[in-house]
Image (cartoon, coloured by chain):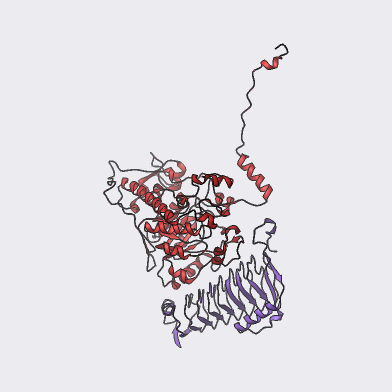
Amino acid sequence: MSDSTDNEHKPQRPLPPLVESFTWNRGTISEIQRAAEEGIYSIRGGGAKRYVPHFDDLLFLGASMSRYALEGYRERCDTDVVLGSRFAKKPLHLDIPITIAGMSFGALSAEAKDSLGRGASMMGTSTTTGDGGMTPEERKSSKTLVYQLLPSRYGMNPDDLRKADAVEVVCGQGAKPGGGGMLLGQKISDRVAEMRTLPKGVDQRSACRHPDWTGPDDLEIKIQELREITDWEKPIYIKVGATRTYYDVKLAVKAGADVIVVDGMQGGTAATQDVFIEQVGIPTMPAVRLAVKALQEMGMHRKVQLIVSGGIRNGSDVAKCMALGADAVSIGMAALYALGCNDPKYDEDYRQLGTRAGFYDAYHEGRCPAGISTQDPELSKRLDPELGGRRIKNLLQTMMLEAQTLARACGKSHLHNLEPEDMVALTVESAAMAGVPLAGTDWIPGNTRY
Amino acid sequence: MIEIDLDKVTIREFNQQLHDLNGTDKKEAYKIMNPRGKHSVAVGADAPVDITVEGHVGYYCGGMNKHANIDIKGNAGPGVAENIMSGCVRVQGNTSQYAGATGRGGMLVIEGDASSRCGISMKGVDIVVGGSVDNMSAFMGQAGNLVVCGNAGHALGDSLYEVKIYVQGEVKSLGADCVEKEMTEEHVAKLAELLEKAKINADPRKFRRYGSARKLYNFKIDNARLPE
């Protein structure tokens, strides 16, 4: 056109690329703006979401010329474990070394607890109560049930103590070592309120310290009391969140534990401050090594059994924990996902809650579309305990088959025969944390060369 | 009367003897000699037995008690009558920390003074103290009554749920969310009943009552203030 200007013929300069600040990224800005609006920390469920070195960074060295493998489907690879042989008159004999971690009725629906009990019982392993006492349903559905003694002591009573197969003194949790529990009012139904002797609908705050002992010397006396009440029959566990694991394990042994449970920072929670979940504790992988080191130095490895939890997802995680020296592992989040937590079939419901399947972590709100972390009867009836039990059984079975596959490949006729020598690390950091050499080298950072 | 000499019988042997009666209504009477501060004396009883302890006990005497009446003629160490379910534990002397912790029923009577955290996390037990209690008593108390004929230390009833606290003397300070409440005739009558049951002589009209302001029941940041 005649009135065209020179400008129109200039080539358009592309917009400069948007550069997001690493320090002040959109997530950070959004959290700052949320804090500015609400004036309080954010609470969520689940475990640490940040990247931490994990068992994926370890690899097994399968047999070839220098080692002799076992035949996949024919040759034995045993999986049983005895827990509590140190002092208890009746130690637990489990068929598989994967137990179900403590999750409360209150945090979870009765249907979810029932499902966990059924699945675990089908596989010959144990379930665990939680910060809300023992329900008759879970006692009935769980062949082997571990009863937790927590700072809150909700529902604690000597009858349930004697009905339990083992007692777990909870001193901490991987998601929040040093923190107490919380269960927000919307999940305190009539039944939950009654079990916990609380008014309905209040935000329940559990203490972070036990009410009747302070420090490991007291705990030793407390454990003696528990043994007296239960006539020295039940194994007594001590559970700690992974932090100063080397020292905590030594003190737990001294305090008289039959079994020590170490829960790494990837371990889940029903409701905790996000800052707590992400910023406190150490990953599971180094915690296993530290715990085993402490036990070995005391001559108590395999005498006091070690259960490891926090981010255990599959059979290879199980096998790697065993190889590092654990006697058993415990799963929590994996069991919830098996039951249908974050299942894409509920994506429409998750969208209505402002999230998506695969991202849901608002367990504290009690509106779980899969009927798991809720006390709403309309939601919880979506979970059929019979079906749920089968799904838990299937997960446990798959994990066992995977762990056995890896153990046989290393020539081991029992999962407990796996050893650190069977593994290498993919990264320098995992080599240092797990105490196995970096692949292709003989280098374990922090150790002198051999 | 069955006499148990703890110089000759182990704690394990005595507790087992006690547990052999559990679930029965046998009203045996035991006299425990030479306790010498031993821990876990008469824990986990579940029968309406009478147990008299002739001396001082260590930690957790009468722990998780059901139905038994335990009379300690001396002082008691930490956690006496912890998680008591029913029955009665009486301490004729003083007690250490966490007396009656998490108790769910029955009664704990302390004729002397109690230390700190008396009645911590109590869940239905009635605790009557003839003397004074120290700091943080009835911390996070959920249900039951705490009666103090003497004085109370700092942060009484901190983070309280539904425990009713009666104090005759001075309270050094109240904990977060604990406030003084009106002493109605109904409360005077209830207190008189508790004192009578505990066989502690005091005038219920001279007591003041404390309870939860219930401001922490549903968490609002503006209500979260540290105790002074």
Question: In the displayed structure, would residue A39 be above or below residue B162?
Answer: above
Q: Quick one: A312 or A450, which is closer to the camera?
A: A312
Q: Quick one: B43 or A436, which is closer to the camera?
A: B43
- Residue B162 is left or right of residue A370, and the answer is right
Q: Is residue A445 visible?
A: no
Residue A423 occupies quadrant: top left
Q: Which residue is situated farthest in the top direction here?
A: A2
Residue A68 occupies quadrant: top left
Residue A338 x %, y %: 45, 50
Q: Which residue is situated farthest in the bottom direction here?
A: B1
Residue A332 x %, y %: 47, 54
The C terminus of chain B - image quarter? bottom right
Residue A147 x %, y %: 46, 64
Question: In the displayed structure, would residue B216 be above or below residue A436?
Answer: below
Residue visible at 56% across and 71% down in the picture: B101
Residue B109 x %, y %: 58, 79
Residue visible at 61% across and 76% down in the picture: B114
The colour with which the image depicts chain A is red
Judging by colour alone, the chain drawn in purple in this rendered image is B
Q: Is residue A288 visible?
A: yes
Numbered disc total: 0
- Residue A26 is left or right of residue A254, and the answer is right
